[in-house]
Image (cartoon, rainbow, N blue to C red):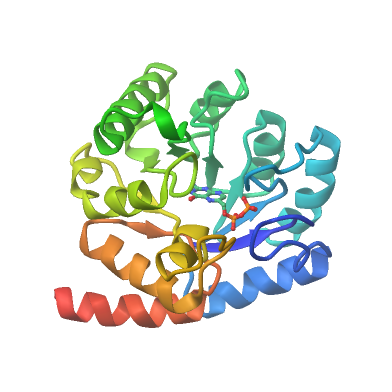
Amino acid sequence: MGIVNVTPDSFSDGGAHLDPDDAVAAARRMLEEGAAIVDVGGESTRPGHEPVSLDEELRRVVPVLERLDGVPVSVDTSKAEVARRALAVGAELVNDVTALRADPAMAELVAESGAWVCMMHWGKQPDYADVVSDVVAFLEERLRFAVDAGIDEERIVLDPGIGFGKTVEQNFELVRRLPELVALGRPVLVGFSRKSSLGRVLGDADAKTGPLSASLAAAVTAYERGATILRVHDVRSHVEALTVAAAVVG
Ligand code: HH2
């Protein structure tokens, strides 16, 4: 999954694709490089991000989504109205980092549209007894909620939410113990690309991002432990690394 942030403030590529032409070109390039789907988002979720109004989010993403009609697209949003507009122009998956908790209209919209949905864990660092068990319990509860709301279980993807209210060690533990999430029986998405834990484990305690080399190691080790979707900024390098990993795994 290639990342196209149509935002001024995303942590690693903020501003790069704010112009719709640039965003569309980036998305098409990622698909050519081997991405199976591109994830278009108009609101940054980085720590301390500015919340974006509905109008502004629509203004950022709709022109991009309209011009990506006919290609596999996911929309990174927690707002049902943004998702509705995205699905109307062909998006296939709603990537909701709040796991259907932010907008009460989201679950029904996904259920009625028949779209895929990705539900992510977003927690608070000091609160965990055991981070992996807590993430599993949360995702299990959200899975039940989504199915009860009429969403086809076969269309649900789960995500541990790397970097969302977790320490560096907890982020790595979630990948180490990924099979415990995979055991829930749904595809698991991992988004470790360029995240600060990668820079921090390399020795920079104040890192805001991590390098490509470290992102590739995280993606490959997540893949080996059962991740189905890797959400990444640098598509070509990840496709190459994962192709080799797949050849080894057999
Ligand atoms: N991470 C980010 C945004 N959306 N969605 C899912 N499902 N999983 C993730 O790990 C995830 C996500 C943060 O990364 P990015 O989009 O690069 O930055 P920003 O939120 O600052 O736009």
Specify the quadrant that holds the C terminus.
bottom left
Q: Position of residue 10 (x, y in %)?
A: 69, 56
Give the camera-side residue of 181 and 172. 172
Q: Residue furthest left?
A: 250
Q: Is residue 30 left or right of residue 165?
A: right
Q: Residue at x 36, y 66 (%)?
A: 219
Image quadrant where residue 30 sits:
bottom right
Q: Residue at x 31, y 79 (%)?
A: 243
Q: Position of residue 229 (x, y in %)?
A: 38, 57
Q: Is residue 11 left or right of residue 220?
A: right
Give the camera-side residue of 24 and 232. 232
Q: Is residue 71 visible?
A: no
Q: Is residue 165 above or below residue 205?
A: above
Q: Is residue 28 visible?
A: yes
Q: Position of residue 205 (x, y in %)?
A: 50, 61
Q: Residue at x 80, y 51 (%)?
A: 60
